[in-house]
C-alpha cells in the first residue's frame, strides 16, 4: 500500500460504463483509482515506476486478450502487484486461482462483499471470495 495509507487500484475493463461505476464506488472508500483502461496492454503501456498500483482489478473476459494472457503480462512486469479478477459473465472465471490471480470475485457477489474482498486482498494472502 502507498505511504498515504490509500490503496492504489488499476482497473481493467473493456466496458467504459463498468469502469466508471466501479471507480466511482471505490472512490468513496480508502482507494485511489490510479489507472482505468480497456485492456491489459493499455495498462502495461501506461505503467511507470511511480504509478504501479497495489492491486489490479481485472475483468477476466476482456475483449482484446483473455484474462490469462493479461495476468501473465502483469506478473512479468509487476510481480508484487496483487491481481483480483472478476467477470460479469457466469462461468469461466469461477475457481481459477491457478490463473495466477490472487483472488477471484464471483459474478454473484454483493457490492458490499466486493469491497470487503478488496480490503481482504490488500491485507491477506490469496483466497477465493465467497
Image (cartoon, helix red, strand yellow):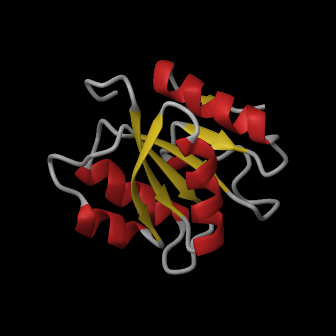
Q: Which of 46/106 is in front? A: 46
Q: Which of 58/127 is in front? A: 58
Residue 74 showing in the rendered view: yes
Q: Is residue 128 left or right of residue 42?
A: right
What is the residue that sits farthest to the front in this orientation?
28
Rendering coords of residue 128 (x, y %):
67, 32
Residue positioned 24% across, 53% down in the render: 77
Residue 15 showing in the rendered view: no
What is the residue that sits farthest to the top in this orientation?
124
Q: Is residue 44 above or below residue 121?
A: below
Residue positioned 53% across, 28% down in the render: 121
Q: Is residue 22 left or right of residue 1?
A: right
Residue positioned 62% across, 54% down in the render: 22
Q: Is residue 45 above or below residue 2?
A: below
Query: On the rendered image, what quadrant is the C terminus found in?
Result: top right
Rendering coords of residue 42 (x, y %):
34, 72
Quarter of the image holding residue 1? top left
Residue positioned 48% across, 19% down in the render: 123
Q: Is residue 112 above or below residue 63?
A: above
Rendering coords of residue 10 (x, y %):
42, 52
What is the residue that sits farthest to the left in this orientation?
49
Q: Is residue 82 above or below residue 57?
A: above
Quarter of the image holding residue 89? bottom right
Q: Is residue 73 left or right of residue 47?
A: right
Amino acid at each position: 500500500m502507498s505511504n498515504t495509507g490509500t490503496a492504489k487500484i488499476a482497473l481493467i475493463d473493456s466496458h467504459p460504463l463498468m469502469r466508471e461505476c466501479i471507480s466511482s464506488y471505490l472512490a468513496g472508500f480508502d482507494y485511489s483509482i490510479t489507472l482505468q483502461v480497456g485492456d491489459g496492454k493499455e495498462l502495461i503501456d501506461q505503467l511507470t515506476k511511480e504509478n504501479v498500483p497495489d492491486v489490479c482489478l481485472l475483468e477476466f473476459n476482456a475483449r482484446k486478450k483473455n484474462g490469462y494472457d493479461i495476468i501473465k503480462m502483469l506478473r512479468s512486469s509487476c510481480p508484487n502487484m496483487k491481481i483480483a479478477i472478476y467477470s460479469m459473465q457466469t462461468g469461466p472465471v469461477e475457481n481459477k486461482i491457478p490463473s495466477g490471480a490472487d483472488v477471484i470475485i464471483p459474478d454473484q457477489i454483493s457490492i458490499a462483499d466486493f469491497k470487503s474482498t478488496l480490503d481482504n486482498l490488500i491485507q491477506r494472502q490469496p483466497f477465493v471470495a465467497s
